[in-house]
Amino acid sequence: MAVKLVSNPPNPYLSQYSELLGPAPAVKVEVYEETAASILSENDSPDIPFRWSANPYRGCQHACAYCYARPYHEYLGMGAGTDFDTKLVAKVNAAELLRKEIAADRRRREQAETRSTKRVPVDSICFSGVTDCYQPLEAVYRLTRSCLEVCLDFRMPVSIVTKSYLIMRDAHLLASLGRAAGAVVYQSIPFSDDKLARLIEPQAPPPSRRFEAMRRLTAAGVAVGVMVAPIIPGLNDKEIPAVLRRAAESGASFAGYTALRLPGSVESVFLERLRSALPLRAGHIESRIREMRGGKLNDSRFGSRMTGEGEYWQSIRSLFSVSAARFGLVSGERSAGRIAPVNSPAGRISTAPSAHPAADSSQLRFDFS
């Protein structure tokens, strides 16, 4: 019987692929620099609460087994498994593009007074709509920080979803942006227990570090929330009260959640990791996932792909709602990307770089692990 290694599943878009007959060799991180053609992506899915997103990186070093973004790597001719974790792409002109695209959008808005336009204006931007904009690569390339400086110049509201402690480097910049236009940071924390998280999110900072980041961001004046995402029935649903309690204690005001998604090759990556890390529980967890997906492991339909169905899923929704109310958190499904309201009006267009003294964190030292 032939056994196929699925740590890096075959790319369905390639006509040829190789199967390893023995243990996989050690994988080294490779970084590719891309001069991108655009940086803003428009979304019209009813499942997602933001219209515009920016992603300075492709692939993610956090290596979360469940990451729904893995199939995007297949469009680059790479794999959705270890390639996604180790073959990383940095869009080195991200900030330059963002400045041009926001400026062009503002000009279109001014012209819209005299002629009709069907284009939806860019009124806020979500960072990490696909991959984590504060993954370790950001410590070197600083693309996210440069993009946030552009947003501050334009008084552009932002939201960020991250698992990283590296975001603390930009705490004062985010506080300045929050005061000027609006900014909220959602820490993605699907597990309360560090050891359990490490099994499924092997390269991401442990939850304890993410809660610490929330506390320090709150102290710096940044609006923070928590995303319990994804909720994996039978695995982390019982951790919901603990995550929300710790988030509230760390200063969070908002809470959101999504159900596990397993599109394309993500299914094989996730199931392999699950069966390897938790062999005695894997069968039960897979059964619960199928229960919330009508017998399937994934539902790709708009309006259904990020939620679930059935009695067990309804019990999860109730647990989340009751727990959020108990700890004073504003909550809802798919809430990441919503911007904390501010009283400051949008500022005028600025097309030149400017210094932001309030955003200077050069005197601070952080451990980004």
Image (cartoon, grey):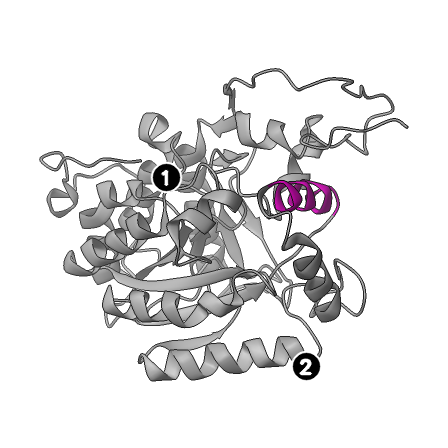
Q: Is residue 254 left or right of residue 302?
A: left
Q: Is residue 212 left or right of residue 13?
A: left
Q: Position of residue 30 (x, y in %)?
A: 52, 18
The reply to whether residue 275 is visible in this rendering is: yes
Task: Name which residue type carries label 2.
Answer: Glu
| Residue at 74%, 58% in the rendered image | 298
Which residue lies under the disc numbered 2?
A: 311
Q: Residue 144: which disc?
A: 1
Q: What's the magenta bit mostly, secondary-structure-wise? A: helix
Relative to residue 119, is residue 350 depicted above or below? above
Q: Are marks 2 and 1 in contact (CB under 8 Å)?
A: no
Relative to residue 321, is residue 185 depicted above or below? above
Q: Residue 131: which disc?
A: none
Q: Position of residue 132 (x, y in %)?
A: 46, 43
Q: Regarding mark 1 in the picture, which secondary structure is present there?
A: helix
> Is 182 included in the stretch rendered in magenta?
no
Counting other residues with Cα less than 10 Å from the Cα at mark 2, is it few (<14), some (14-19), or many (20 or more)? few
Task: Name which residue type carries label 1.
Answer: Thr
Q: CA distance from mark 2 to mark 1?
A: 41 Å
Q: Range of the magenta residues?
A: 264-276
Q: Which of the image's four quarters has the C terminus?
A: top left
Residue in front for this viewpoint, 166 or 241: 241
Quadrant of residue 21 in the image?
A: top right
The reply to whether residue 154 is visible in this rendering is: no
Q: Residue furthest front?
A: 280
Q: Which of the image's four quarters has the N terminus?
A: top right
| Residue at 20%, 39% in the rendered image | 354
Q: Is residue 309 left or right of residue 277?
A: right
Q: In this figure, what is the number of numbered marks? A: 2
Residue in front for this viewpoint, 284 or 59: 284
First of labels 2, 1 by sequence position: 1
